[in-house]
Structures are given as structure tokens and as C-alpha cells.
Amino acid sequence: MLGGAAVLFRDNFGQSLVSGTIAWLRTAFETHMPSGRNIQWWFRGARMSGRLWPVRSHGLSNSARRVFGGLLCLAYIAATARAQERREREPNSVYAERRGKLAAQADGPIILWGFTGREEESQAYVFAQEENFYYLTGHNEEGAGLIILPAGQKGDVSSVSRETLFLPAKNLQKEKWNGVRMSPSDPGIEARTGFVAVKSFESDFRSMVENLAKTFPDFYTILPYQKELGGYPHEKAVVDWLQLAAPNAKLKDIRAQIGALRQIKSPGEIAFLKQAIDLSLDSHLEAMKLMRPGLYEYQLAAKMAEIHAWGGSEAEGYAPIVGAGPNSTVLHYDKLSRKIEDGDIVVLDVGAQYSGYSADITRTLPASGKFTPRQREIYDIVLGAQNAALAALKPGMDFCNKGDKSVHKIAYNYINSHGKDLHGKSLGPYFIHGLGHHIGLDVHDPGEFCAPFQPGMVITVEPGIYIPEENLGVRIEDDVLITESGHKLLSERLPRDTVEIEKIMAEAALARSKGEKNEVRGNVSSADTLADSGVVRSLIAKYAKSVDDADTTLAAEVWLNSPDVSFIHPLGHEHGFEQIKQNVYMRLMGDTFSERRLSVHDVSVHVYGDAAWAEFYWDFAAKFRKDGSVLATHGRETQLYQKEQGRWRLVHVHYSGMPVTTR
């Protein structure tokens, strides 16, 4: 996705509501809706935080959000003002470490607000936290505040905790409407949030700010980004409040420091991004299979979002971009109203979100299943530019449009030296945007344009050519992890080559003509099978969580409680759930390691009636309880699931581990 707009749809509803809503969605999908009339509310809703669609495209952006309204509209309205419940979050220690790093860079208190829940123009929305606040706290409920004191405290602040989370007081009346919220009076709230001090926002926040102003001349917060426009409403509200509470304090911007931290992804963040990417690849493969003249753009977008939701995505990473024919040349086309015609080229820029982290994937497809000679020529030039940039991608390179370290320059030069427009001119001027951007909590995460790439960054690489005169736009976008030795293409399993794309589309067209069900990486046309695949994926995520926490109670929600289940691993094999609990969860995971993290990626699920076969790659990191040494390994795993009385349960695991490393 280009530019700086991240459009997010947030949900917090149960499986039954999802089922009913997607059934409704499928009915709408299969019904021929009039083009351009009744579809506007599907993918377009209230502006969030009062921000308009064109937004910041660099720096530490808190993206403008337009509610992704119609995709799951019924569930969306039912979840009015609910806090989004993310699938997973990182351990409290990770957020605490981030706060510690930030405190070391400030000589005064850092004062931040989360979103209040009152930023929206419409009451029919699902709350999602301000990204920077979430990055530092992992807290995803409205009305919270945060104060972090500098690492080198000075003055009389000995009675103040180094970091304090402020939460709204308990409101039983509100909870009747919107569900239970965390409050400072909850038993064990400190352990739950990871803060030593949790206080009331209403009664304690301002008084602490006023007291700190007596000691510290400088306060740090996130200042409004566009000062000449008065700033964005949330940021401006924080600044206005601070100027009233501490009129003599000098306010300094902490934006860049948080942004620098967010650029380097933790192992947990990378795992969440891989989950989002995997779901996005599944939906793009399904779109390749589904694509044909006669569909509307919004129908493809709806199908892709449906696959994301069934697979465990709690949101779309941004408003889907599906542009056919002339719309393929519009970078952030969002009307989704055109009927796809024979001969059209179709750009699909669609990405899922998982646990708050957004993928960003684009493919360009021929509506008829075969590229015309001219479409193939332009497509191959874009693919060649992407391959040239990827070949040079490593630490030290950058997105700058000049200099010998510029991957943008490499891609531009390739495009400019291959092919011509209808007037015989070079194609360079038709590559009208940057080569890529960072992804993370924001689909356009913080990242300085000309800063060198570092290991741990996750970026997009997305060259494109857009020729309005020919109604011909092509963009290919993939997500890439920068590594110590180069890079890893996280979206590698999604075909980019024209021959592979045409093959998938031809096989799908043949299957349609025969009335057969066609499977692409575990996603099939059958609604039941699609739902089952999503349930199995959610169980895989729960399985990984049960390993992370050595949690036998959670494991019991994944495994079939039977003496016939089995677990084969490099150290031996276990038979029966009781033996698996004792030997794998309690002894190996619980007694051997003090910390552990299992990250799964490249998940593939194949459903056959009441049986399912899943396979994936995994990375495992752990700390030995005995001496604190660290273990890191990776491998591949196969799992078998069985459906009994309508419930899927894990019955067999077989994994192979690669050589371990310790330090």
C-alpha cells in the first residue's frame, strides 16, 4: 500500500456472530449489487480521530483511520464502542523494556495519553488504541494515560514510581453496555498490566503532572505533526491539556525516539507480522482463483476480507484497494465500484492485520486469466525492477531516491531502461511513488526515508508503473525482513511470475467449468471448509500460546483428551494427553525453561471432511532455568486435527528440529 493511510477495521465479536455476519456477507457477495450505488457504505465509514483520508506518510505517524464499515457491518454495529480484543500480545517484560529504553533518552517526564474512545464521529465503531501508546504498554482499552520518569531522576520525586499507568475508575453502568474494563481497583491489576503502579486517571493523573512540574522544567509528549493546521485532534488535545496543567513546562517531542524503537521489530512483532502476511497470501491466492470478468471490485475485496476474518485476523490492515482497468492507475483507489471487464488488468492491494500488526501485499492480475502482450511487457518490467531491488537489499541500503545505497534508484533505473510508452519515451516517469516503507502496528510504520536499513526492520518493496493513457497500472508488493546477512522474503509463497499466475487462474477456471471445488493452500469455495480452516488456524495460534506459557489448561482446549493422541519429537514420543501434559508441557517446557517463545509461520491447512492436516515452519527461543543460557532453534511441524461433535481438536504432532544454538 502506498502513501501514509492505514485504514483499519476493528472487531471484537464471538465466533457465532462472525458466522452469522459472514453468511450475510456471502449473500450480499453472491447478489448482483448495482455498481456505484449501494456499495459505498461497505468499505467506507466514519473518519476516526477526526482525520481526513490523506495523511502523514513519514515520521512517527498515528495513521488516519476510516472505519472499514460494510465488510462485517452487522457485527461492527453490534460491537459499538467495544474495545478490540487482539489475538495475542507480547509479554509484559517486552513492553517494560521498551519503556526503559525510552526513559534513557529523556531528561524529563514522558507523558502520553491513549485514545479516549471519544475521537470518533460515529458511535458505531470498535475502539483501537493509539499505536505508540500500545507499543509501550500493550494496553488496548480507552481512557488510559502513561507517565514515565527519566532514567536519571533528579529532585524530590522519590515517592513517585518510575512509570505509572493510569486507568479509568470502575464504571459498572458503562460496563453493562460495553463489557468489563480494567480499572486501578481490580485485584492483581499490576501483574496483569506489567506496571508496579496503576492509578486512577480521573483522580491522580493531573495531580501527578502538577507535582512533577515543580521539579522538571521539560515534559516530553507527542506534539501535533502538522502545526500549521493545529495538529491532529488527539495530539492537540494532549498538548492543550498539558499546557493548562503545567503552564510553565516546556513541551518537547518524543516522536522520533519512539519511532526509532518501533523500526526494529522484536521476535514477537515479527511473528505477528508473519501471521498477518500468511493470511494475506491465502486471500490473494483465493483472489487469483476467483478472478474473472463480470465480478465487481468490491466482491473481490469482500472475499479477501472474509478469508482474513476466518483465519483469525481481527481487522483489515487498511482499506482494500482493488482497481480494474482505468482504476489500476489510481494509487489509493477506494471506490470499489467498477464491474471488471474482459481485458482489464486488476491491481489488488489488500493486507490482513493480526494482533494489531498489518501486512501489505499487492498483486496485479489479468481479468481474463491471461495477460495481453502489452500487459505482460509492463508486468515483467515491474517484476524485473523488484527483483533487481531485492537482489541488492541488505543492511546499509536505503529507500532514498539517490546515492549508491538506494534500492529505489536501482528499481527506477531498471524501469527507465526497459520498455517505452506509446510515444517512445522511457517509462521512468510512470514510476510515481517510493519503492517501499516500514510495516508494523501501522501499515506505514515509522521509518526515515533515507536512513540505512538495519537487521530486524520489516519493509515493503513495491515498484509500479501507471500509464493512464493505456488504462494500465501494475504494482507488485512484497513484505521483507532485513537480516544480518541480507533479507528474507516473508511473502515468498505467493507467485509473482506471470506463468505461475496464469497457471493458477487457468486451473481455477477449469474447476469452475466442471463445477468442482478447487483448493488453493487450504482455502476452498465451500463456506464450511473455509470456516473449518479458520478454526484450525486459531487452534494453531492457541497451541503456540500454550507452549509459550507452558499452560496445560490452555493445552486442554487444543488437544483431544484421549489416550490415543500422540506427540513425536526429536527426543522421543509421547502417547496420550496425560503423558503429553506431563512430559512436554510440565517437564520440558515448564521445568527446563524459565522463558520460551514459539513462533509459527508459513501455515498451510488442508481440510478433508472431519479431518484436517496442518503444516508450518516454526522458530523457538527459550532461556534455560538452570543457568539462564539462551536456546534458539527452528524446524518444521505437521499436525493432524479431528472434528468430533462439531469441535476441532489436535490429535497428532510430529516435528523436526534443526540444530540448536545457545549463548
Image (spheres, helix red, strand yellow):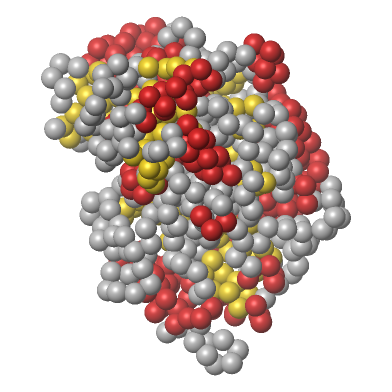
Image: 9 above or below 439: above
Please state the horizontal and vertical placement of residue 628, each as a whole percent of the image: 16, 22
Identify the residue at horizontal 44%, vertical 43% (top origin).
222
Is residue 450 visible to us here?
yes
* Residue at the outermost bottom position: 424
Identify the residue at horizontal 43%, vertical 50% (top origin).
60
Image: 15 above or below 70: above
Identify the residue at horizontal 70%, vertical 23% (top origin).
16
Image: 286 above or below 411: above
Corner quadrant of residue 467: bottom right
Image: 83 above or below 565: below
Corner quadrant of residue 309: top right
Please state the horizontal and vertical placement of residue 90, each as a whole percent of the image: 39, 29
Identify the residue at horizontal 31%, vertical 10% (top origin).
586
The N terminus lies in which quarter of the figure? bottom right
Please state the horizontal and vertical placement of residue 342, each as a whole percent of the image: 74, 69
Corner quadrant of residue 601: top left
Q: Nearer the viewer, residue 116 or 633?
A: 116
Is residue 302 visible to us here?
no
Q: Nearer the viewer, residue 187 or 12?
A: 187
Please state the horizontal and vertical placement of residue 305, each as a whole percent of the image: 64, 44
Direction from residue 233 to residue 189 in the image, left or right: left
Q: Nearer the viewer, residue 513 or 292?
A: 292
Direction from residue 130 to residue 18 in the image, left or right: right
Q: Nearer the viewer, residue 396 or 229?
A: 229
The C terminus lies in which quarter of the figure? top left
